[in-house]
Structure formats: structure tokens, C-alpha cells
Image (spheres, grey):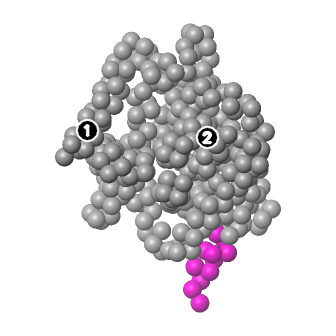
Amino acid sequence: MHVTSTLTGWLIIVGCYLVGEFLVLVTDLPLPGALIGLLLLLGGLLLRQRPPETVGRGAQPLLSHMSVLFVPAVIGVGLFWAEVRENALGIALALVATTIVALGATAWFAQRLLIKAKRPD
Amino acid sequence: MLRAELAIKQIISRFSDVVSSTASVNGVLWLAVTLAFYAVALKIFRASKGHPLVHPLSITTLAVAAVMWFADISAAQYREFALLLHWLLGPATVALAVPMYNQWQNIRQLGAPLILSVMVGGALAPLLAWGVIYLTNAPMAIQMTMLVKSITSPLAMETGAAIGGIPALAAVFVILTGIVGALAAPLTYRLLNVTMPDAQGVALGAVCHAVGTSKALQMGEVQGALATVGLGLNGILTAVVLPVIL
């Protein structure tokens, strides 16, 4: 039973993805097909208003092992190595310094906003 | 009518490329190599209690790259052999709808201030990074790639491609951003006196996507839940806004 429902959930997810891709190709939307698929699935789940057991089971392996799916992409950086080395300083600054600043500023701002939201007076 | 037919043909031909490259000897071999290293990397990651420096992606990639070097396989060849893994990123992105749905109550309860917080992070992180990389005169493709560094990799790669960036580079920028944020979060929060769990989580999710979310989960349940919201909302907002305005 477990296996069938995981498989069904998985097929629903792949189905949403393919429909998303199809819609993007047909309408020339400038958005990723996978994003349309995500919105379709989210919309479907919200309409049904029941805990998404089947889809949840299908989603689990994809979500918990997502890291391995990026390996081909990261390996592909080898193709752009020259460009990366040429701009190494800027890239390093952008990735390290601005990430820390943005994280701190966002958290500080969120704290001010959310504390107000939790005490509506 | 004709458009629909063309679209279906395109989707089928992509899919059959995936099947044929995976069913080849090299496809099976490199898939097995990648998955074996990934299994080991997961063990190491768990043994270190999820330290962001030993993220399974970095270990697996380094190990695969080493084998490629010995076997004299180019990056382009590997990518063709491992097409299945790359294709699965699509369904994996769609699967993000499930945690978003599970957090829907949270999103509705905190409402506008939550969405506003995510938007601040979602705008600040890419704009600051872009500013720095613009000042160093980096090529346009790298500038565009910087803009997607704070969203979850599958969306970042597709959005990066849509606005003229480099998808492979996007994946690397995204992971490094996540690792930096996860390492820096505890000290940054202490210095700025950010003690509210909700705020800690939202910022980690919005600025540092999945790597930040797993750090947030370590900090606590509330942080983890809010980070999932930040990751999902910012991913969607960025993926919708960037292609439209650029």
C-alpha cells in the first residue's frame, strides 16, 4: 500500500511539472515551468483542504534528497571556470559579505514587524 | 492547436533524451558512482550533526569531480550521462508545494508583516550582491546569475536561465550563499539582538533558502517552520518578479 501511494503521489507531482512545462511552452510565459507546476499543486492542495498524504509521500524522497540532484549542475561550473576566476574577488565579496548583511538586516526588520503583528493593540 | 502539438513534441523529446542517456552503460555507471558517493556524504553529514561546511552536495561533487578527472571525462559528458538527476530537479521544485501547504496556517496567521519581511530579504540580498558584482565590472551573465543566489536552487537555475544568467553557476552561488548564511547566522543574530524565533527563521529561509532552512530546523521548530515559509515565498516571488521586470 505504501509503495502504491508513494508512486501515485510521485506521478501527481511529475504530472503537475509536465503540465507546467506545457503551459509555459504554449503561452510563452517568461516563467520556469517548474514554478507553474508548484503553483498548480499548491492550488490543488489548498482547494482540497485535506492533509496531502499521497502527495506528501511522493514528495518526501524528492525533498530530502534534493542535494544530489544538483551535482550535475555544480559539475557544470567547470565549463565556466575561466569566467569565475577572472571575477573571483567580486564573486567572493558578493557571496560572503552581502549575504551576512542581508541576513542580519532581514532578521532585524522581521523582528520589528512580527512583534507588532503578534501583539495587535 | 499547432502550438500545443509542438509543445507536446518538445516535452516528449526531452523526456526520451533523459531515458536514452540514463539507459546507456555510461549513464548507469555514472548514476551509480554519484549515488554511492552521495550515500557516503550523507553519512558524514549526519555524523557531523549537519554542519553546513560538510553539506552533502559539496562532498559528493568533489568526489565525482575527482573520479571524472581520473577517468578523463569532461563536465559536458558527465552532464549528459547524469541527465536524469538534472531532470528530476523539475519535479523536486514542484514538491516544494507540500511544505508550503503544511505552513499555510502560519502564513495566514502572520499575514502581511510576514510577507513584507520576506520581500525585504528577497529584495535586499540580490540587490546588495548585484551592486558589489556590478562595481567590480563582472560580465552581464555573472551579474544576472547573482540576482538569483538567494532562492532555492531549482528555481534559481530556471530563473537564472530565463533572465540570461548561467544555470550551472547559479547552483554554485546558491549553495555558497546558503553555507555562508548558515555559518554566520548565530553570531549575526546575537550581535543584532534578534531573539525572536519567527524572525530568525524567516530571514534564514528568505536569504539562505534550503541550506538556511536546515540550519533553522536545528535552531528550533518555529525557526524551521518560518524558514520554510521564507524559502517558499521568496522562491516564488523572485521567480515571478525577475523574469517580468528584466
Q: Are marks 2 and 1 in contact (CB under 8 Å)?
A: no
Q: Which span is picked out in magenta?
A: A110-121
Identify the residue at image location x=37%, y=56%.
A39
Quadrant hosting residue B48? top right
Distance Cα–Cα, label 2 vs label 1: 29 Å
Which residue is under mark 2?
A: B141
- Is residue B90 shown in magenta? no
Considering the numbered disc 1 on the image, is that residue within a helix, a strand or a loop? helix
Task: Please report, as a chain letter, where disc 1 is located.
Answer: B
**Count of numbered circles in the view:** 2
In the rendered image, the residue lying farthest to the top is B71
**Quadrant of image for the C terminus of chain B:** bottom right
| Residue drawn at point x = 48 percent, y = 39 percent | A66
Q: Position of residue B124 (x, y in %)?
A: 66, 60
Query: From the viewer's perspective, is B197 left or right of A56?
Result: right
Q: Residues within 10 Å of mark 2 (few under 14, many from 20)?
A: some
Q: Position of residue B217 (x, y in %)?
A: 58, 53
Q: What label does residue B131 carry, if any?
A: none
Q: Which residue is mark 1?
A: B6
Asked which secondary structure carries label 2, the reply is: helix
Q: Earlier in the sequence, mark 2 or mark 1?
A: 1
Residue at 62%, 61% in the rendered image:
B123
Give yes or no for residue A115 being in the magenta stretch.
Answer: yes
* Amino acid type for the residue under numbered disc 2: Ala
The residue at the point 52 percent across, 75 percent down is B112
- Give the chain letter at badge 2: B
Q: Give the dominant element type of the magenta stretch: helix, strand or loop.
A: helix
Query: Which residue is at the far left?
Result: B1
Q: Is residue A81 visible?
A: yes
The part of the image, by quadrant, that contains residue B26 is top left
Left or right, A49 with reference to B225: left
